[in-house]
Amino acid sequence: MEIKVVHQILEWNEDVSRQVADVLSENKVCMINVMGSPGAGKTSLITTVIRQLSHKYRIGVIEGDIAGQIDAEKMQDMGIPVVQLNTDGACHIEAMSIQNILESFDLANLDVIIVENIGNLVCPAEFNIGEDFRVAILSVPEGDDKVEKYPLMFSETDILVVNKFDMLPYFDFDIQRVFANAIEVNPDVEIFTLSNKTGDGAEAFVEALSARIDEKIK
Ligand SMILES: Nc1nc2c(ncn2[C@@H]2O[C@H](COP(=O)(O)OP(=O)(O)O)[C@@H](O)[C@H]2O)c(=O)[nH]1
Ligand SMILES: [Mg+2]
Ligand SMILES: [Zn+2]
């Protein structure tokens, strides 16, 4: 008899993530899974997207954090429906949590749900949560070797945002190395350099995001 131990959680997660994806499709809602290290700029990027796209789409947010609700409060202040998911120590979000949370949203009146995953470059990449696509953020101060060191995060993403590009002059950060490493592990990845501080590069990223959203909901 086959003995399943380690993979059981991942297989169960896959089943539930398919159920979540079905519910989202039935309701024509596009879900985006935003991942990256603590401080990479996930919340800032989501805020940028909300500012630029909330006239076009009805957006909701799920804020994943180990504890607290600091980021969720920022979303609420922008008038966005938000649910805070506290993982109480767990370092990634699983599909089961998303499935439970979806009941809190009025899905018929939403076009997009943006999920801010737990700040972590490792295991969030292993767990599908029913998303339509992923955005991985790497920020300049983290260093240009991170794609090589954490390949799964970058091989499994659809979009890579290199954030805090305004800080490039202050760091020995070789953007060509990041491009080369990312394309090596993920030939189809779309890459954007961007600063949430100055707004440089945000327009191209938001346009690409919008095209992917339209593909799902139109
Ligand atoms: N200079 C600069 N700072 C940024 C940028 N994006 C985010 N930050 C700052 O980085 C810190 C962490 O950002 P936050 O969005 O909270 O990161 P998160 O932990 O990934 O959600 C905050 O102080 C932001 O103001 C950027 O493009 N340039
Ligand atoms: Mg955050
Ligand atoms: Zn984890």
Image (cartoon, rainbow, N blue to C red):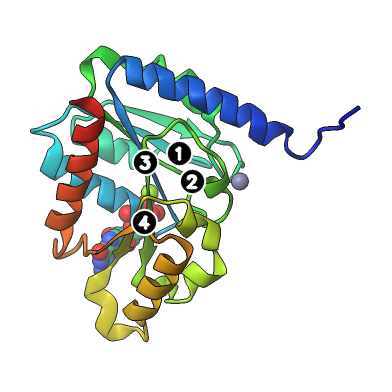
Q: Nearer the viewer, mark 3 or mark 1?
A: 3
Q: Which residue is mark 3?
A: 133
Q: Quadrant of residue 172?
A: bottom left
Where is 68 relative to 143, above or below? Answer: above
Tell me whether circle 4 and circle 1 mark residues in contact (CB < 8 Å).
no
Q: Can you identify the residue that label 1 sits on?
A: 64
The reply to whether dot 1 and dot 2 touch (C-beta < 8 Å) is: yes
Q: Amino acid at mark 4?
A: Asp
Please name which of the two marks, 4 or 3, marks the residue nearer to the observer: 4
**Which structural element holds mark 1?**
strand
As drawn, the label of residue 118 is 2
Q: Earlier in the sequence, mark 3 or mark 1?
A: 1
The quadrant of the picture occupied by the N terminus is top right
Q: CA distance from mark 4 to mark 1?
A: 27 Å
Classify 10 Å Cα crowding around label 4: few (below 14), some (14-19), many (20 and above). few
Q: Callout 2, which amino acid?
A: Ile
Residue 74 placement (x, y as % from top left): 27, 40
Mark in the foreground, 3 or 2: 3
Residue placed furthest toward the left:
55
Q: Measured from the top left, where is residue 53 in percent x and y? A: 13, 39
Q: CA distance from mark 4 to mark 2?
A: 25 Å
Q: From the Cβ of disc 2, is ligand 3 less than 8 Å away?
A: yes
- The residue pinned by badge 4 equals 188
Residue at x-position 61% and y-position 42%: 89
Task: Determine the residue located farthest toward the right in the rendered image.
Answer: 1
Q: Is residue 74 above or below residue 181?
A: above
Compute the Cα span from label 4 to label 3: 13 Å
SS state under label 4: loop
**In the image, what residue occupies the spot 36% across and 82% down?**
174
Residue lying furthest front: 187
Q: In the picture provided, is 56 more to the left or to the right than 154?
A: left
